[in-house]
Image (spheres, rainbow, N blue to C red):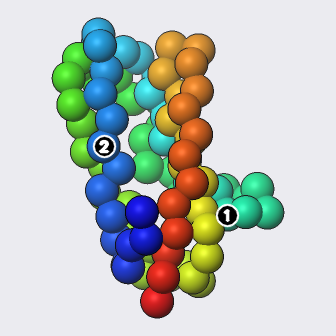
Amino acid sequence: NPFNPSTQIRFGLPSASRNVTLHVYDVAGRRVATLLDAQALPAGWHEVRFDASALASGVYVYTLRVSGSTLTRAFTLTR
């Protein structure tokens, strides 16, 4: 899962969803990016590009929230 300096975050939605949010945090818990902010998306697969060119190397966490469910995954930025 290492990437440099950008990556695609892929996820699937089984049905159309409202209020989809996708945030990226550093390991200290500070939000460093908002990729989706309460957006309505149709069912199916989606890709969101994350450009981390302004961030330092390290481990980051993204959190996807959809209809009351939360998915959290870690990924590593290497330079």
Is residue 51 depicted above or below 9 in this figure?
below
The alpha-carbon separation of the residues under discs 1 and 2 comes to 19 Å
In the shown orientation, is residue 18 left or right of residue 49?
right
Q: Secondary structure at mark 2?
A: strand
Q: Amino acid at mark 2?
A: Arg
> Residue shown at 61%/76% (left/top)?
58
Q: Quadrant of the N terminus?
A: bottom left
4 over 8 or under it: above or below: below
**What residue appears at the point 49 percent right and 41 percent down from the top-left corner?**
22
* Residue sitting nearer the eye, 17 or 69: 69
Image x and y of residue 24, in percent: 56, 54
Residue 14 x/y as whole percent:
29, 13
Classed neighbour count for the residue bearing mark 1: other residues with Cα under 10 Å, few (<14), some (14–19), many (≥20): some
Q: Which residue is disc 2 drawn over?
A: 10
Indicate which disc, 1 or 2, sits on the residue closer to the N terminus.
Answer: 2
Q: Is residue 78 left or right of residue 25?
A: left
Residue 44 in view = yes
Q: Residue at x 43, y 81 (%)?
A: 53
Total count of labels: 2
Query: Residue shown at 20%/23% (left/top)?
Result: 44
Above or below residue 22? Residue 30 is below
Find the residue positioned furthest to the front: 1
Name which quarter of the figure residue 28 lies in: bottom right
Task: Tell me where residue 2 appears, x and y as whole percent.
Answer: 43, 71
Q: Is residue 32 visible?
A: no
Q: Name the element at disc 1.
A: strand
Q: Which residue is mark 1?
A: 26
Along the line of sight, the residue nearer the viewer: 66 or 4: 4
Q: Nearer the viewer, residue 12 or 2?
A: 2
